[in-house]
Amino acid sequence: MTHDWLAFAKSLRSIAQTGQTYTTNKYELERYRQLETLINQMFAVLGDVPVEKIENLIIPDKGYATPKVDVRGAVFDEQNRVLLVREIKDGLWTLPGGWADVNESPSEGVLKEILEESGYRASHPRLAMLKDRSLHPYAYYSPDHIYKLFYVCTLEGGAFAANNETDAADFFPLDALPPLSEGRTLPVDIQECWAFASSNAAGIYSD
């Protein structure tokens, strides 16, 4: 039942956001803003947290409400180990990746994320799978609808380089994964990427 209320609140949030974007009536604009405030209060009640925490948690967004896109790169070495990076924010490990950027194709973005977060160069990104985050057991509820694109890429070389998001990068055997940041990457994501990589599938052209 709680899941239903979260879905209702997400739908109302998208209506409030889109309404504020397109209305030309100042009275309607004020009502949409009031609706957004009420929605934040709904999230606070459902999550049993102060409304101020909800307002600080939600990423400000404007324009037509549409899903966000997260790109993740799976890179395997010659020993069939997977490249993971450790997030500074939670101290847990994940496939390198992040939000897709404007003026970049998803495949360009994932190669950039791999390099920036791990220090390793990769090439030949192949789209292995696309997941609707809300339909899978990722940790932490997100008020945003998110599509996750997983690419299998070819390792070219490199070494970890310090950056603002991760503090380590390493290769791990598939049967000895470190504690994962499960809001970003699930163990099954890695296993499915390996199944795709070992099948020598051509992948899907995604640009």
Image (spheres, rainbow, N blue to C red):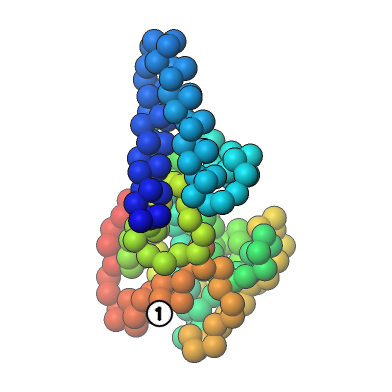
Q: Within the image, what quadrant is residue 114 found in?
A: bottom right
Q: Where 177 falls versus 75 (above or below)?
A: below
Is residue 33 among what the camera can see? Answer: yes
| Kind of residue indicated by mark 1 | Gln
Task: Decide which of 175, 60 is in the foreground and name it.
Answer: 60
Is residue 65 among what the camera can see? Answer: no
* Label 1 packing within 10 angstroms: few (<14), some (14-19), many (20+): some
Task: Decide which of 90, 174 is in the foreground and name it.
Answer: 90
Q: Quadrant of the N terminus?
A: bottom left
Identity of the residue drawn at 44% across and 10% down: 26
Identity of the residue drawn at 48% across and 85% down: 174
Residue 50 % position (x, y): 62, 44
SS for dot 1: helix
Q: Within the image, what quadrant is residue 169 found in?
A: bottom right
Residue 9 % position (x, y): 40, 42
Identity of the residue drawn at 59% across and 40% down: 51
Q: Is residue 129 left or right of residue 95?
A: left
Judging by the rendered image, the residue that carries numbered circle 1 is: 191
Residue 11 % position (x, y): 35, 40
Task: Decide which of 188, 85 is in the foreground and name it.
Answer: 188
Residue 61 % position (x, y): 49, 34
Identity of the residue drawn at 32% across and 65% down: 129
Total marks drawn? 1
Q: Where 104 falls versus 17 (above or below)?
A: below
Q: Is residue 169 left or right of residue 122?
A: right
